[in-house]
Amino acid sequence: QVQLLESGGGLVQAGGSLRLSCVVSGGTFTTYVMGWFRQAPGKERSFVGAISRGGSRTLYADSVKGRFTISRDNADNTVYLQMNSLIPEDTAVYYCAADRWSPTRSSREEAYDYWGQGTQVTVSS
């Protein structure tokens, strides 16, 4: 059974940084495109970014481009989301997800097969 476990969320002031981690167990990590999504209060879940299986290619939502960076360590089955220059609008529950089948990075929620439970990020003004 594939499991994803996020960590690293918390409370940070605007302008600050956080790094989220997501460890994948029970599957073959290198076969997954990995993505990050978020859900703000009262809103639908939305795409944040994705990284290819080898880690050389990334895709970001316009709202986070230039501020967030996705990376992965295939030796440790871990994907990261480095978040810099945080703003209150980044407040959300952040989810990592694994996509088994897409040929490349996808921003579509329905492309992802496995999901973590989420970690809360709160940015104060």
Image (spheres, grey):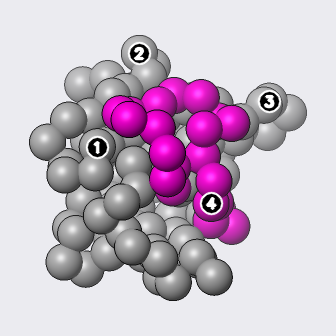
Relative height, residue 50 to residue 121 (above, below): above
Q: Which residue is mark 4?
A: 114
**Alpha carbon separation for disc pair 4 and 3:** 21 Å
Residue 8 placement: quadrant:
bottom left
Residue at the disc numbered 3: 43
Q: What amino acid does circle 4 point to?
A: Tyr
Extreme top residue here? 62
Pointers 1 and 2 in contact (C-beta within 8 Å): no
First in residue order: circle 4 vs circle 1: 1
Q: Say left or right for 79 vs 113.
A: left
Q: CA distance from mark 4 to mark 1?
A: 16 Å
Instruction: Where is residue 62? Give x, y as percent.
Output: 41, 15
Look at mark 2 in the image and give the residue it sits on.
62
Residue 102 covered by magenta stretch: yes
For the residue labelled by badge 3, is the local secondary structure a helix, a strand or a loop?
loop
Residue shown at 35% from the left, 52% from the top = 81
Residue type at mark 1 is: Ser
Provide the residue designation for mark 1.
52
- Please tell me how crowded label 3 is: few (under 14), some (14-19), or many (20+) other residues with Cα within 10 Å: few
Look at 59% across and 77% down and name the residue there. 3
Determine whether, in the image, residue 107 is placed left or right of residue 38.
left
